[in-house]
Image (cartoon, rainbow, N blue to C red):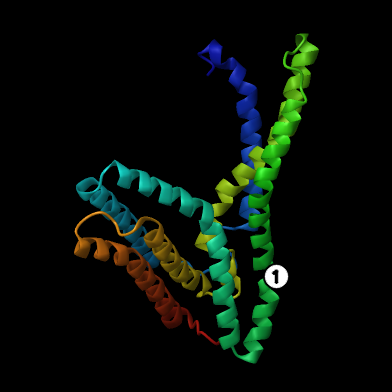
Amino acid sequence: MLFFPCLWWLTVPLMVGYQLARSARRTARRVFPVRPEGYVEDPEVLRVQRVRAWTGLAVSGALVAGFGGWQDVADAQRQFLDRLLFAPWFALLSAAVVVALLFWAARPGTRRAMRTRLWPAGRSALWYFGAWTLLPLLFTAAGKGMGLLPTSANGWPGLLLWVSVMFVCWAPFWWVIFFLCFASGPALRHAFNLSAVHAALPALVTSVLVWVFAFLGLSAGGLPPGPVPVAICAFLGGPVSVTAVAWWEIHRLRQRHGVRWRG
């Protein structure tokens, strides 16, 4: 930007945006650390998960390119946005169900230990869903605040007032946006830090969540494009492969780290 004087006016907004993003990232990493308590990092499992994810993406793209039309592309985009919007809420519901079942199956002594570790996970979930709830409220408040400004700025004092009000109105909204961007990946990957309660919980929640989204996509858009046998295989391939990888991860936790369902 230094070589283009016409873009110098972007310097201050970019600096302010950088500071907001940095503050939001610091908070997101504190609430949702990359390696939360109880998380067991298995490089081989991570490698298989990446391969499965890229393979699923390639297969979906090949089906749409080979058998689909523009309507299928639009449906795929709509389903992606729906998952992006509803994934946190379904993840919370799935996590609550899985935790309740695991808590019911645990031994009495294990239940007491799990109960003490539930609060930190619940607090991180409150952070995340509180941010989602604040987002429309902050957007509405920012719009109302900007509507109170005069339509034209009179000289430098008016311009300074306009910039100050705009910052006060929109800075909280963009901070929450940045927080959600940095927090969503670790929050969903580690099921809201539930590995501190039980090391197998993130894999279990992932298994439940992928089947929920599969049947929601089936009810909303039907089978993937293509011949019926291929479409059925594509529909079942995603959740079956994710579930297989998740249970393999749990098996490795049991074999290598002594993780037990009730222990």
Work out which residue is located at the far right of the displayed protein and give it: 157
Residue 33 picture location, percent across and down: 59, 58
Residue 53 shown left or right of residue 203 in the figure: left
Which residue occupies 47% across, 52% down?
A: 82
Give the quarter of the figure containing the C terminus: bottom right
Residue identifier under label 1: 119
Quarter of the image where one finds residue 236: bottom left
Whether residue 208 is visible here, answered yes or no, is: yes
What secondary structure is found at the residue carrying circle 1? helix
In the image, 53 versus 214, the foreground residue is 214
Left or right position of 75 against 82: left
Q: Which residue: 63% across, 28% down?
A: 15
Q: Position of residue 194 (x, y in %)?
A: 58, 69
Q: Residue at x 25, y 48 (%)?
A: 68
Decide if residue 191 is in sight here.
no
Name the residue at the bottom extreme: 108
Rendered view: 195 above or below 105: above
Residue 110 vs 89, above or below: the answer is below
Above or below: residue 236 compared with residue 222: below
Asked if 31 appears above or below 16 in the picture, the reply is below
* Residue nearer the viewer, 1 or 70: 70
Taking 96 as reference, is 248 left or right?
A: left
Structural crowding at the residue carrying mark 1, measured as other residues with C-alpha within 10 Å and reported as few (<14), some (14–19) or many (≥20): few
Amino acid type, mark 1: Trp
Task: State how many labels appear.
Answer: 1
Percent position of residue 72, x then y: 31, 47
